[in-house]
Image: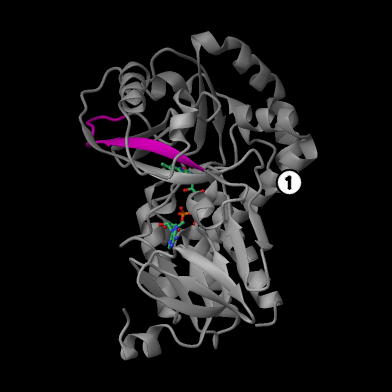
Amino acid sequence: MLSYWERETFFTNVDVCIVGAGLVGLSAALHLKQKESALNIIVVERASLPHGATSRNAGFACFGSVSEILEDIRNSDEQTVLSLIEKRWKGLQLLKKNIGEENLGIEYFGGNEIFLETEKEVFEKCSDEINTLNKNLKAIIGSEKIFSNADEKIAEFGLNKVEHLIHNDFEAQINTGKMMKTLLQKVQQIGVQILFGLKIENIVDEENKAVLQTNDFNFAAKKVLICTNGFAQQLLPNIDVKPARAQVLITKPIKNLKIKGTFHYQNGFYYFRNVGNRVLFGGGRNLAFEEETTSEIALTDLIQQQLDKILKEIILPKNDYKIDMRWSGIMGVSNEKLPITKWLNSSMAVALRCNGMGVALGSQTGMDGSNLILESGI
Ligand SMILES: Cc1cc2nc3c(=O)[nH]c(=O)nc-3n(C[C@H](O)[C@H](O)[C@H](O)COP(=O)(O)OP(=O)(O)OC[C@H]3O[C@@H](n4cnc5c(N)ncnc54)[C@H](O)[C@@H]3O)c2cc1C
């Protein structure tokens, strides 16, 4: 139940309500308020902190490993995949512009895709395509030396059982926490209200407005932008985006850590990186696709045990280490790799589905969502 003061101060004359304070929702709010400073914009977030994918991710500033790109080309066509990579690359530049390199804590250590002795065939296919890919990506990235065979780095990184390594000079890593803190501050500083702990249960399209229902009270906004990503089907059962849980762990600081940069393994189903002198490692969703198609933030023994095994046998075979934390987050995925930004009715639009590459796609997806609202002439 709201008081008169609460209703009048926070929920009256709302022009735009953005649901979800992840990278997409906050980027939309930033752009919208920068373009139309008079708009009364609120962002509502169900949890005490943004609690989906953005603040729980691995912080890879990536645009695709060779095996992922080739798999995507097999599933669609080369031109579509190149334009997707271009979106990711441009999205990363937009993220840097919005947040600033220092606030992102960006580190240009490069990326690496590793192949075990059992993955000779996949490696050879990838290696054969490096030159063609580099040529095709030159116009996007601005260099022809993007991917290269770099087996000599395997020993440098202290990896075990790894036979081949493809290096990507243009992949980087960010500090996800710093990114979110900066973005939250920027959005609030320009006058957008962010209300935490407010879960939207239902949204009803009425004449010239949408009514947002919570378990306690209702309020209206002229336009609503839904940026709830992996949770979207809770509000919109027919939308083509499914939840996909991703589980990760991080070690305590490790003496003489050799791992530096970002690493992809098994078509991107596993990923690890250094965070200072710690290792962050995640993946394994392919072990239990059905069970991991969930919006429940939780851990499972099956996946955590597999992460432990790979960490010990392949990533840190010679180091003493302890696990500091384990957590999971929820992505929004579909076979369709492009995000969705569109109107659902006269008052409600969506901007979501960055799949596993929201660091690259999130800022532009938010901006595209905010452009829909601006074009509506609000
Ligand atoms: C473990 C993990 C590792 C990842 N690693 C990487 C990586 O290294 N690089 C990369 O590019 N991408 C990575 N991703 C994916 C990336 O984080 C996402 O694509 C991106 O953050 C999506 O941003 P978003 O704003 O769309 O969604 P989210 O960040 O999920 O934001 C949606 C928000 O909506 C809120 N919400 C949901 N329902 C409601 C409701 N009814 N009412 C109010 N609020 C609601 C949620 O609490 C959430 O905060 C990773 C994801 C995970 C989970």
- Relative image position of residue 93 (x, y in whole percent): 58, 57
| SS at badge 1 | helix
Q: Which quarter of the figure is the N terminus placed in?
A: bottom left
- Relative image position of residue 240 (x, y in whole percent): 62, 47
* Residue 248 is covered by the magenta coloring: yes
Locate residue 377: give its quadrant.
Answer: bottom right
Span highlighted in magenta in the image: 243-257
Q: Is residue 64 above or below residue 34?
A: above
Q: Does residue 142 appear anywhere in the picture?
A: no
Q: Does residue 211 appear anywhere in the picture?
A: yes
Taking 359 as reference, is 314 left or right?
Answer: left
* Residue 5 is covered by the magenta coloring: no
Taking 355 as reference, is 337 left or right?
Answer: right
Taking 333 as reference, is 199 left or right?
Answer: left
| Viewer-closest of 264 and 294 | 294
Q: Residue at x 34, y 23 (%)?
A: 302
Q: Which residue is mark 1?
A: 83
Q: Residue at x 60, y 61 (%)?
A: 350
